[in-house]
Amino acid sequence: MYWYAEETGAELGFNLEKTSKAKSLKLPKEGMARQLHARRLEGVDKNIWVEFTRLAADYNVVNMGQGFPDFSPPSFIKEAFCSAITGGASMHQYTRGFGHPALVKILAKFFGRIVGREIDPMEDFLVTVGAYQALFSTFQALIDEGDEVIIVEPFFDCYQPMVMMAGGTPVYIPLKPRKSTGPALSSADWVLNPEELASNVNPRTKAIVINTPNNPLGKVFQRDELQMIADFCIKHDIICISDEVYEWLTYDGTQHIKIASLPGMWERTVTIGSAGKTFSATGWKVGWAMGPGNIIKHLKTVHQNSVYHCATAAQEAVAVGFQREYDMFGTEDSYLKQLPAQLHTKRLRLAECLRSVDLEPIMPQGGYFMITDISSLQVDLNDPSTKDEPYDFRVVKWLIKEKGLATIPVSGFYSPEHRGEFQNYIRFCFVKEDSTLKAAEDILRQWSVKK
């Protein structure tokens, strides 16, 4: 698009009287010749959630892909939110930028009991817009140009681009399945090789990122595994970034242990938490980073120069929720005990359905998700638009387009160098209404009958 430099020519410094072609002088109205994007965005523009959310929206699907409940949060937390927004003018204005006082105080009290130490609510917590922002602030604050960050695979996909945007270099070490000793495959059978971990450390190694319970696998690192990681961190003076958003969702007696509670690890661990996962309210976007004040202060610098502040009313409601759970901790009335019991039943239901159609689920020890082996599937993948994509990506797109069932390809949780080894799995989210699970079952069983 162009505009003509006639009446405004003098303002632009043109002498129109001396320019015979002034009437036809064309100047660009919009567009720039120089590169617009910052180099730190190169290679991080693609996002699995953007792609598959858009695809699922284009079709009438049963959504077993995205990790959010399709049921409501508990009544007490909804009532707390309602009370907050009707509770006076202060709930609609700014609160403390690094975390609503009521919230950080109960978080310090609640988690202090768990890690066995006194936590300073004002120094040792940063409240963020979901765990996602807590992770972003952590990487921006602690990772510098040239630093290497060990990422244990499979990993939540944002770790890689966040490390890269901070100028760091991701180093990937996959959990690998060992032969199962039980009647069913379990996420516990996927283990981290200590020799492989040791061989990937060098003077540039700044941090290691773990996710327990793991998304998408559902693995919950046990004490001996965490101790091995802790010994590694202490020996090599490495920061541990521990993403624990699913910490309350463990099954079959599996215990979640915070690596920050191990000797020598509080001083070097940033623990990431999520109220959305804790109270089944993912849309509230209230998360936090917890750790020693001398580390958290750097996250605060990123926060104050970017997001600065999180929604006051949501923080107040989460504070009320945690106070209730503190008072009821360990009892049958605790939501933190009721929710995993509820999800355990859904987990078993999905696993049984997958086995009934000759798929092989990996039973998760924790979290929202279950992956299943699809290597035995006999599917006519004749979509030419997907021919160059990993097998699981092709299967997931086929399921969406042909069967109306949305899942997520597991190879999307791996680095390019390891993706090919893990393209025979897809991920289901079982944190859904029974009606949603039933609809997915119907699709899978009807398909199985027709095969």
Image (cartoon, rainbow, N blue to C red):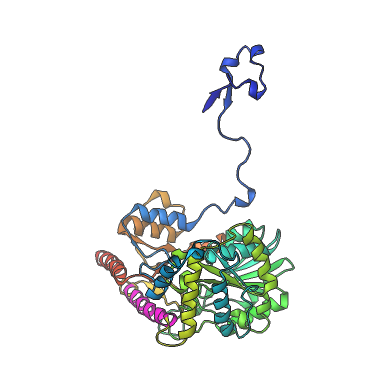
145 to 28, vertically: above or below: below
Q: How many marks?
A: 0
Residue at the extreme bottom: 331
Q: Residue furthest front?
A: 88
Specify whether residue 350 is in view: yes
Task: Name the residue rendered at 53%, 68% in the picture.
Answer: 287
Q: Report x, y in % for residue 125.
A: 61, 72
Q: Which quarter of the figure has residue 115? A: bottom right
Coordinates of residue 95 in the picture (x, y in percent): 56, 65
Q: Residue 331 or 101: which is nearer the viewer?
A: 101
Specify start and end residues of the magenta stretch as a single range.
Answer: 335-353
Magenta stretch holds residue 391? no
Residue at 40% across, 78% down: 339
For residue 244, side relative to residue 62 (left or right): right
Residue 34 position in % (x across, y down): 63, 37
The picture quadrant where one finds residue 305 is: bottom right
- Residue 422 in sight here: no
Measured as percent of width and height from the top left, residue 352 is found at 33, 77
Magenta stretch, overall SS: helix
Could you say which is closer to the camera, residue 60 or residue 288? 288
Horizontal side of residue 323 vs 292, given as left or right: left
Decide whether residue 346 is among the magenta residues. Answer: yes
Give the quadrant of the C terminus: bottom left
Residue occupying the point 62% across, 61% down: 303
